[in-house]
Amino acid sequence: LADRLQNTIQKIRGKGKVTESDVKEMMREVRLALLEADVNFKVVKEFVKKVSERSVGQEVMKSLTPGQQVIKVVKEELTELMGGEQSQIAVSKRPPTVIMMAGLQGAGKTTTTGKLANLLRKKYNRSPMLVAADIYRPAAIKQLETLGKQLNMPVFSLGDQVSPVEIVRQALEQAKENHNDYVLVDTAGRLHIDGELMNELKEIKDLANPDEIFLVVDSMTGQDAVNVAQSFNEQLEITGVILTKLDGDTRGGAALSIRSVTQKPIKFVGMGEKLDALEPFHPERMASRILGMGDMLTLIEKAQASVDEEKARELEKKMRTMSFTFDDFLDQLGQVRKMGPLEDIIKMLPGANRMKGLDNLQVDEKKIGHVEAIIKSMTKAEKENPEIINAGRKKRIARGSGTNVQEVNRLLKQFEEMKKMMKQMTNMQQKGKKKGFKF
Ligand code: GDP
Ligand code: MG
């Protein structure tokens, strides 16, 4: 989606208002992308209509291009479509609270049962019991028991010769006796949905009357995930969805489709195989992910909030007339720093999450401090005419700022380069204006 949109954005840059044809063009891309992401046709239609209505004729925010403005609306509506943040879990008035896990084989039910139990204890201080009700998959009981051991939590099991319904019945009695306030039932899955599986799940449901029925869905399965969600919901009336394997490289289309088809909230997402890799679902983050732009919008919003409009205009004028001085440079540094630590800003850039070694990245805040100190040690004349800074002056500045001559030299050189770059940019801008776009 991102690539397609970027192209269209390029085309409609630099206008003061979003026109109907801008929006039409962008919506064509959005529509295609959403359909490709398995979103229901009707939902797409409605979505596009809503976004179009909101976008046309809007004044473009100073810091955004019309393209970005439309994307912002798209993102807000996507977020809305995926529902609010709903990571809370039901609590029964008469404990234990029963949570039933359902889903196809390999979706991540057993793993997620462990993760959820872990979360319930860690975050809510609960004492869950796990129930091994998958008697078909050879290693399923063992798998849950291993998880229980790792978590140091009780696992109720009667082997694979007792029916799942009977297992659950006895488990509930045991939980009451042992004062476990949550009972998490790990059920069997199948490779495909079949009547036998559904009947068994319904029997468990009728007996245990669960407070939550979570459908566990593998987010990598795309269109299938949507069909699975639809039929589980129809037959079992799920209360929420847990999307697993979101750490794999999916674009998150499943989240959107599942939510719109079932109208049930996505409560958690699985982000890895470890027991602490379960996170609340953040619709907004998912919207960004679907749009494939990192936290670009947050970044734009941040920039907008912290950069002083007036100053930005002044700066632009200075760049044009080439009267940009060290004072302006200092000012600009201040503006950038207002946005927060540089590391955070860089991490929000699109593609940054895919960049290797970013974890080790540490923008040297100290160096920026030095730069500031050096500039502050310059006289007014020096700041306005750096050419006059000779060897003697360099020594004085270095002493005054607690740095050394090399650092002063480096900054002077960087400043020269920057001015050169600005000159190029202004030239380009002048040419661009003739062609009808601006920066
Ligand atoms: P079940 O058949 O539905 O019980 O699925 P399992 O819990 O046995 O999980 C199947 C496989 O998916 C296992 O190898 C899990 O480690 C893996 N898995 C489950 N959730 C996630 C997740 O969020 N991320 C990743 N990467 N793997 C997961
Ligand atoms: Mg399992």
Image (tube, rainbow, N blue to C red):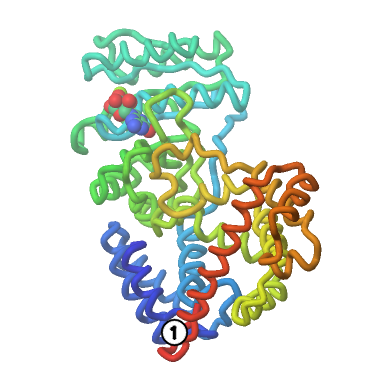
**Quarter of the displayed picture in which ligand 2 can be seen:** top left
Q: Is residue 343 visible?
A: yes
**How many other residues sit within 10 Å of disc 1, few (<14), some (14-19) or many (≥20)?**
few
The residue at label 1 has a CB less than 8 Å from ligand 1: no
The correct choice, above or below, for 175 with respect to 311 in the image is: above
The image quadrant of residue 328 is bottom right
Give how far across and how far down residue 363 sits, in percent: 57, 43
Is 140 placed above or below 278 here?
above
Q: Name the amino acid type tagged 1.
A: Gly
Is residue 30 at least partly visible in the picture?
A: no
Which residue is found at the position 55% from the left and 35% from the top?
A: 89
Q: Nearer the viewer, residue 228 or 424?
A: 424
* Residue 35 found in image quarter: bottom left
Q: Nearer the viewer, residue 344 or 140?
A: 344
The residue shown at (43%, 9%) is: 149
Nearest the viewer among 126 and 183 is 126
Q: Locate residue 62, reporting x and y percent.
A: 61, 76
From the image, tell me which residue sits under label 1: 432
The percent position of residue 33, horizontal first and vertical second, equals 30, 64
> Residue 175's x, y, as percent?
51, 13
Q: Residue furthest bottom?
A: 434
Q: How many marks?
A: 1
* In the image: residue 65, left or right of residue 155: right
User: Which secondary structure, mark 1?
Assistant: helix
Side of 134 relative to 357 (left or right): left
User: Which residue does the image show at 35% across and 45% down from the upper left?
Assistant: 233
Residue 314 vs residue 406, the one in the foreground: 406
Please identify the quadrant where the N terminus is shown: bottom left
